[in-house]
Image (spheres, rainbow, N blue to C red):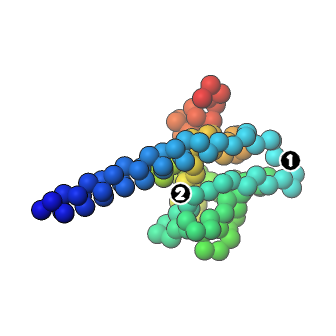
Amino acid sequence: MAALTSAASILIALAIGLLAWRLVRTNTARADLPPPLREGDVFAVPVRELRLGASHNSLSPKLAITTVGIRFKVFREQEWRFDEIERVDLFRTVLGAGIAVDGRRGGLAVTVANRDVVRQLLRALPPSVALTARAAALRDDAAS
């Protein structure tokens, strides 16, 4: 019985340590604001995970905002033009924060390190892309 209690204590301590490490890592990943995109420019977004429908990529996800749309790689590289995006919303996970992109071809969930990276991503999108109220509030929030 004592061995079981000791093993449980060790498991709890490891879980708390992992959670603390994850929180520190999430809250210290800061990045600079992206400059406005000019013709031919690409803003590469540091991504933790991409989900497209039931498929996901957390090993080598790639996302870039170009002057014409978003380019991403879940299994193969795809590009959605801005006029194909119906709306962009926010979400939060244990792994960080993210945006949900609803488009004509489906839904794309983008998980990044924290809200600062989400804010930069939202600011890199052109004004023609529809944002939910909370996404627009985060984009326009200069104080945090």
**Residue 94 coordinates in the image, percent (x, y):** 44, 50
The residue that mark 1 highlights is 38
Dot 1 amino acid type: Arg
- For the image, the number of numbered tags is 2
User: Which residue is rendered at x = 76% and y = 52% of the image?
Assistant: 43
- Using the image as rendered, state which of residue 53 and residue 127 is in the foreground: 53
Q: Quadrant of residue 57?
A: bottom right
User: Which residue is rendered at x = 84% and y = 53% of the image?
Assistant: 41
Q: Secondary structure at mark 2?
A: strand
Q: Is residue 144 above or below residue 132?
A: above
User: Which residue is rendered at x = 56% and y = 62% of the image?
Assistant: 50
Residue 122 in sight from this viewpoint: no
**Residue 36 coordinates in the image, percent (x, y):** 80, 41
- Using the image as rendered, state which of residue 69 and residue 58 is in the foreground: 58
Looking at the figure, which quarter contains the C terminus? top right
Q: Is residue 49 left or right of residue 39?
A: left
The residue most toward the bottom is 76
Q: Is residue 144 left or right of residue 94?
A: right
The circle on residue 109 is 2
**Is the residue under label 2 in contact with that under label 1 (CB below 8 Å)?**
no
